[in-house]
Amino acid sequence: MSDKSATLSVGKTITVKLTANYVTGSPAIITDQAVWTTNKSSVATVENGKITAVGKGTATIKASFGGKSASIRIVVK
């Protein structure tokens, strides 16, 4: 994932990219292919890597693809 953490204000967005590093050595951007989830939709929502801050607090956004996952911590102030 392009970032490990971010701090946002309510109503702001950030877009992160997800990259897969294949055995062949060829990295590929798979942002649109991953399954994105949030552990607190009252704090941040996510769709295809676009994270929107909706309420104050902390949320973890997770992207899953091919049995692997990565996450980013979002703090909304």
Image: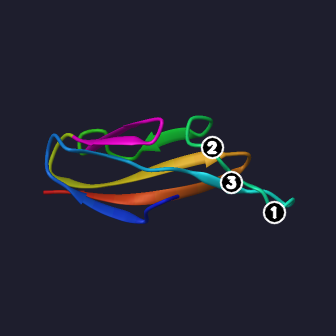
| Residue visible at 60% across and 40% down in the picture | 34
x and y percentages locating residue 4 in the rendered image: 43, 65
Residue 47 forms part of the magenta stretch: yes
Q: Which residue is at a point 14% across and 45% down the rendered structure image?
A: 10
First reached walking from the N terminus: tag 1 or tag 3? 3
The kind of residue on which mark 2 rests is Ile
Q: Does residue 74 appear to the left or right of 35 in the view shown?
A: left
**Residue type indicated by callout 1:** Gly
Tell me where the magenta segment starts and ends, as one range: 44-53
Q: Is residue 19 left or right of residue 46?
A: right
For the residues marked 2 and 3, what is the alpha-carbon distance in whole angstroms?
7 Å
**Alpha carbon distance from label 2 to label 1:** 15 Å
Q: Amino acid at mark 3?
A: Ala
Which of pointers 2 and 1 lies earlier in the amino acid sequence? 1
Secondary structure mostly seen in the magenta stretch: strand
Marks 3 and 2: in contact by CB < 8 Å?
Answer: yes
Write down the residue under mark 3.
20
- Residue tagged 2: 30
In the image, residue 20 lies in the stretch drawn in magenta: no
Q: Is residue 32 above or below residue 75?
A: above
Q: Which residue bears the numbered disc 1?
A: 25
| Snapshot quadrant of residue 33 | top right
Earlier along the polypeptide chain: callout 2 or callout 3? 3
Q: Secondary structure at mark 2?
A: loop
**Kind of element beneath mark 3:** strand
Specify the quadrant that holds the C terminus.
Answer: bottom left
Q: Nearer the viewer, residue 12 or 41?
A: 12
Q: Nearer the viewer, mark 1 or mark 3?
A: 1
